Image: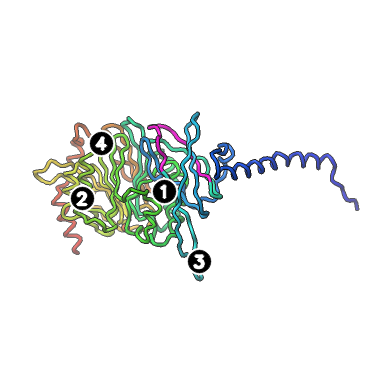
Amino acid sequence: MSISKPRRDTRIVSSVSLLPLVCLIAALVVVLTTADGCEIAPSRSMFQKRQFGITKGPMLLRVYQERAALMWETETEGPSRLYYWRNREPERYVESTPEKVQYETKKDGKGTVTKTAFIHKVWLEDLEAGQVYKYRVIGPEAQSKVYKFHTTPADTDEARFIVYGDSRTNPGTHRKLVELMMNKKVDFVVNVGDLVSRGSRYEQWGPQFFEPLKGLAETVPVYIAKGNHDRGNGYFEKLLILEGEKNNYGFDYGPVHYFCVDNVSGDLRSEELLKLIWADAQSSKARWKFVSYHIPSINFGGHWSKWGYPDALRTLSEAGVDFVLTGHSHQYERFRPIAPAPGTDGSFVTYVTSGGGGAGLSNVEATCYHASAKKIHHFCLFHIKGNKLTMDTIDIDGKIIDHLEITKTDGRLNKQYLWTAVPMEEIRRYQELKRKR
Ligand SMILES: [Fe+2]
């Protein structure tokens, strides 16, 4: 039997080939050590490939013309730095002061274990409108990939966005919808609430909300109207609301003004919230005005919700709102436009219940008041260009299940659409009657 010995030249080649790797690791150690303690920024190319140590996010919470806000979570204590830049522009960074969260979670089905997480939220300031920015997170013992987002353009008559809701409980379904959304190249996403089964259980926020949104929420802001399932221990606010901001907030994108409202927390009564919606819509000159809150004001099937009665329909019309998108009932329903109350100069409001983002579905039967009603997982894709609005509702197989096309000229919707409108009192009476059964 003969034993072959390694050839000398092979060993030399191996040693030589390891040398650059050793140098690279040494350089990496030096760079990481200095990054937390001085002004030297690590070179971009070294950090683009791998993400580690970040347990939630990064996720864009707000993007405006000159500011943007992000969040992420680490398991390691200490500040992170978020580096951001445009092409050919020097890197800048903002340092986070994380908030510590301790929570109990089950360990292998037996007993509980206490875990700790650190939530980071930062604002990026002095951005330029309509520009692409790159960013990445570094430290402590964590780094993200390099991601891109674009700031809101200063002057555009176009907006593409998605609205959906009730994405809780079945992460696989939520993920399938997000994968479809990723191909739609939208400017922002609105989730109308119920992000997790039980908001007080911190361990649900990762698998049910942050993980299904990977690949989308790093590059496109996700605005949220809080749902009733999101309440508990203040985790919704800790994760998603920025310091100094409230759960009710508005933003603009080109021809769209959007107002997200929390109608589940109970710190404001419905009359006060409706006044807030009215004041916000009145102060905006945008061509298209949208409002989202979780519990619908008009909804047949599911919970048969009628939040804000008896004033909601009238107030929203008098405020000049065009679309109200809600959730809570796990179905899709688009109502025919609801005409203003007689003698008032309000808008014709289109109400949509979009509660099919993942949670188990509820029954809905089409009535003469519906333009469309379906028990189906879905999301709504809007494309607005100037005076034309298109909405495609897309199901979990990627099929368009509802299509709406309307125009608005000099503040009035096209006549063909208005001919389909239903009187406000009639639809209210119908809901009262059916709900009592
Ligand atoms: Fe709900």
On whether residue 133 falls in the magenta region, the answer is: yes
The residue tagged 4 is 286
Q: Quick check: is the Cβ at mark 1 less than 8 Å away from ligand 1?
A: no
The residue tagged 1 is 177
Distance from disc 1 to disc 4, alpha carbons, whole Å, reads 29 Å
The residue tagged 3 is 113
In the visual, does 16 lie left or right of 79?
A: right
User: Range of the magenta residues?
Assistant: 123-138
User: In the image, is residue 177 above or below residue 152?
Assistant: below
Quadrant of the picture in which ligand 1 is shown: bottom left
Between tags 1 and 2, which lies in front?
Answer: 2
How far from the left and from the top, in percent, is residue 207?
A: 46, 56
| Whether label 1 touches label 4, CB < 8 Å | no
The residue tagged 2 is 274
- Counting residues from the start of the chain, the first of labels 2 and 3 encountered is 3
On whether residue 423 falls in the magenta region, the answer is: no
Between tags 2 and 3, which lies in front?
Answer: 3
How far from the left and from the top, in percent, is residue 435?
A: 20, 61
In the visual, does 99 lie left or right of 284?
A: right
- Counting residues from the start of the chain, the first of labels 1 and 2 encountered is 1
Which residue of the protein is positioned furthest toward the right in this rendering?
A: 1
- Counting residues from the start of the chain, the first of labels 3 and 1 encountered is 3
Residue 59 visible in image: yes
Residue type at numbered disc 3: Val
Distance from disc 2 to disc 3, alpha carbons, whole Å, reads 43 Å
How is the rendered protein coloured? rainbow
Q: Residue at x 17, y 58 (%)?
A: 432
